[in-house]
Every structure is written in structure tokens, then in C-alpha cells.
Image (cartoon, rainbow, N blue to C red):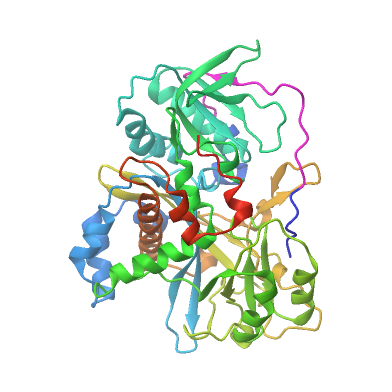
Amino acid sequence: MFNSSMPETKFTPKTSAKTVQPGEFEAHMHWYPKALNATIHPMVNFFLNLDQERVINRYCHLHPTVDSEALRQWLNYRCRQFFWAGADLLNVTSAGGKRQMVVIENNSCPSGQKSMPLTDDNQEQGGYRLLIERTFKPFVESKRTGLKGDLAVIYDKNPMEATGYAAVIADVFQEKVWCMPFYQNDPDPAVSFQDGVMMVRDENDERHPVRAVFRYLTQRPWNRLPLHTRTRIFNPVLACLAGGRNKLIAAKAYDLFNAELEGTGLKINIPETIWDVHKSQVPVWVKKLGGQAVVKIPYSNAGQGVFTIVNQEELDRFMASEYVYDRFIVQSLIGNYQWSSTSSKGKLYHVGTIPNSKGDTYVADLRMMVSSTDHGIRPLCTYARRALLPLEDHLAAGTDSWDMLGTNLSIKKPDGTWDSDTNRLILMDRRDFNKLGIGVDDLIEAYIQTVLSMIAIDKMAQMLLNKQGRFRLKYFKSFNDDEALVKEILLT
């Protein structure tokens, strides 16, 4: 089980921005070696190249009650705040054999490019280039603010992908790009704001204005980046507060959008979710769900602040700890059929991987990355991750359920920096993909679930702005009245 404590990153004095020039992209620096040397599975490549009409026709053929016009409308949706997303989905089934993809969360600033084998038609810069050309470039050029300045990339983890994006941006725009870390505990960061304009500090201690920035900040970005800036920020921080980094608001956004989808045959599949739960109330909701549940700190990510509870020992351990925030969400737990939560949605359990030679099946999730384009919301890349230990039919006393259920690869080291357990990475290549036991129809289902959950968050983000485009703080608090969170938000 992951602890909620967040060790502080140790810094060298005076972090400075580095320049990335056109022509500096080197593939081996921006992919895991096992992904760079892999051959994409033909089925995955086929899925990524399906045109929209074929996707609609196939999905509606398998789901006859779905309104094809409604599906077409949502696949062509143009996002206004949440432009780039990556959903984590579980392939689950019921006792009656009804399989579905369930959305666990949808992330702003998602990882994935470094884990994706190159496709047959994109052998140079892969999905990095697709995202920058399809989505980031139009975003930068869509509003002529008159602001002069450079382009930049900022990050607080995953430098392999962040620097890859910087190099591709330099190539696409044919200009230098500033690239620098921006950690939440840095006492002297290279990033600051003057009159709403982001300024970056170079190695000579000079400051440079930025007209647009590609943001890879995953750790509470609202405590460093103001909501209202003249510099264009991709994705806007508002997308994080509206659900991209806020699981509590995301759950409410999904609920609201599902109400709007009523009658179309479309729906976002999510575990049963109880929100606005005080710590003292957690045992009551765990009991209601049959003694198995997942408790989440809504504003954490990368596997931090997620607690799988299947026995009294794990519940006691959760209750004995102290937490920064006042609100939690509690969700039904999806495990083995013998020990999954009993909820109003019925009992769901993991399909899991194809059994290995020892007969072991592992829990695995699927990451589907998409972005908003001129031609609708399109897939970019996908990969999967498996748990550390195989899924057991029966739980032994004292079992630590996280090792069987947790799939996130991120590892936070004692000094506060991040690493990844790539041994559990499942590539979409000729060797690994077959382990998942999924096909094109499952990928289409995952894609549509990702699109719907992305739209729900984008709609919530728009609701949180008034007619003048200013953040409605009081309205936000009506959805998420967590004083510890509200105090962190930088408005300007």
C-alpha cells in the first residue's frame, strides 16, 4: 500500500532553464529501450489507423442501443480546456460474463509516449510529433494575444518525455524552446510570473518571457501555476482542478455527463463512488461495500494516496495515518470474484492477463492517450501495466492487497525523485500485447470511454468559469469544499 507522505525533492541552488534547438531530437533519449526496439502489434496499429466512421459503425453494431449520431457528435467534440488526456481503464467482467472497460481516472499530462512502439507510418518522432502537430500547435496559434516571447516546457517528473516534447516543439516551430524542472518545493525555481507572463531564468540569471508553455506538472500544479495568466498554458491548470488531477471533481463530472447522455445508449463506466467522505466516515462506507473498498486522496497521482482495503488490518492502517486534506473518495473494489466489493453496480472482477506457464493471472490496466484535434478527439498511444503479484482466488490472513491490485509503475525514491518499474510494463508489441487477452473491439471500447470521460471533465472546467472567463471559486467550493485544497489554489 502506498503511503500518503510526500518526501520533498532535494534541490541544487538556482535551477535554470536549458535551451533545446531544432534538430536535437534523439529517439534513444525519449523511449524506453524495450519500446524503441519493439515492433508494434498489427492489431494495435490497425486500431490507431481506423477512421472515425468505421469506429462508429463497429461500436454501434456491437451496441445496438447506442445512438450513432450522438456518438459521432461526441467523437467530434472540440475541447476548450482539457486538450490532452490519458485514461486508466480496467478490463472487467461480471459473473454473467459481461465484459466492459471501466474508467479508473483520466489524467491531464499523461505519460505514455516512451512506452509506445513506433507505428508503421510514424518512424521518426512517434506520438510526440502527433500531439504537438495535431493539438499543441493549433492551441498556441488559436489566440493572437499579442504577447511576445518564447516557447517552453516545464515538468516535475518524467524528464524522458518532457524533454522529448521540448525537442519536437523546437522542430515543429523551428525555434528554440526553454526546458526546465519546476518542483513544488523548490525554494528558488527557474519559473516566475510577472503581470501574468511566465518568465524563465537562464544559466546567466537572465529572465525571458514565455508566450506559451507545454506543461508536464503532475503534482498539485495549482500551487505553482496561476489559473489566470497571459502566457498560454497547455493543458490549462483549470483542467486539473476540474478532474484531470482531482478525482473527487472527476467523479461528479462523470455523474453529470452520464445524466446528459441518458437515452443515447452511451455511458461512462466507473466503479461505484462515494465522494466528500470525511476520514471518520471511511469505515462505514467500507462496511457498506462488503468490507472491500478503495480509498483515495482525491488530489494525489502516480499511485500515491490510493489505499486498497480488503481486511481489517488494512483499514486500521489507513485510519492510523494522518493526511493533509479533509476529503476522500471511496470506491467499490474490483478484485477477484471471490473478494470484490458488493455494490449497486453488481460485483465486478478483473479479467486480468492470460495465465502464464505457472497458471498465474495478473491484474492489468490499460492507458489510452488521446488529444483534441480539428478532426475530433483522436487516439495517440496506448500501453498497459500489470501488478507486482498474481491475483489470488482466496486471500490469506495479513495479505497486502496493493501488490495484487496496484499497477502504477511510478516509484518515488527517498530523495523525492521518481523512477519506474519497467519490468511490469506491457508493451503494445508483437510479444507483450497478446498477454492482455484483448482485441480491436476492446481497444475501441477503451477509446470511447476515454473520450467520454475527457469530455465530462472539459464540460466541468467550462462550468467553473463565469462569462468573463474568470474562475468561480465559490461555485467550485460548492463541488469541492476542502479548505486545505482551496488554500493551495493560485488565482493570479
| Camera-side residue of 166 and 120 | 166
Query: Magenta stretch containing residue 339, yes or no?
Result: no
Looking at the image, residue 429 lies above or below residue 349: above
Is 62 placed left or right of 125 in the picture? left
Is 196 placed left or right of 201 in the picture? left
**Residue 455, horizontal then vertical, whole percent:** 35, 56
**Residue 62, horizontal then vertical, whole percent:** 28, 75
**Residue 436, horizontal then vertical, whole percent:** 52, 67
Disc tally is 0
Hey, which residue is sitting farthest front in the picture? Answer: 474
Q: Is residue 37 visible?
A: no
| Camera-side residue of 489 and 120 | 489
**Residue 138, horizontal then vertical, whole percent:** 32, 33
Q: Which quadrant of the figure has residue 204? A: top right
Residue in the image at 65% along x and 14% along y = 203
Looking at the image, residue 334 lies above or below residue 406: below
| Camera-side residue of 417 and 481 | 481
Q: Main secondary structure of the magenta part?
A: loop
Query: Magenta stretch containing residue 16, yes or no?
Result: yes
Is 388 placed left or right of 469 in the picture? right
Q: Is residue 353 visible?
A: yes
Q: Which quadrant of the figure has residue 99? A: bottom left
Residue in the image at 39% along x and 41% along y = 470
Q: Tell me the magenta residue range.
A: 7-26
Residue in the image at 74% along x and 76% along y = 315
Looking at the image, residue 63 lies above or below residue 456: below
Looking at the image, residue 289 lies above or below residue 212: below
Quarter occupied by the N terminus: bottom right
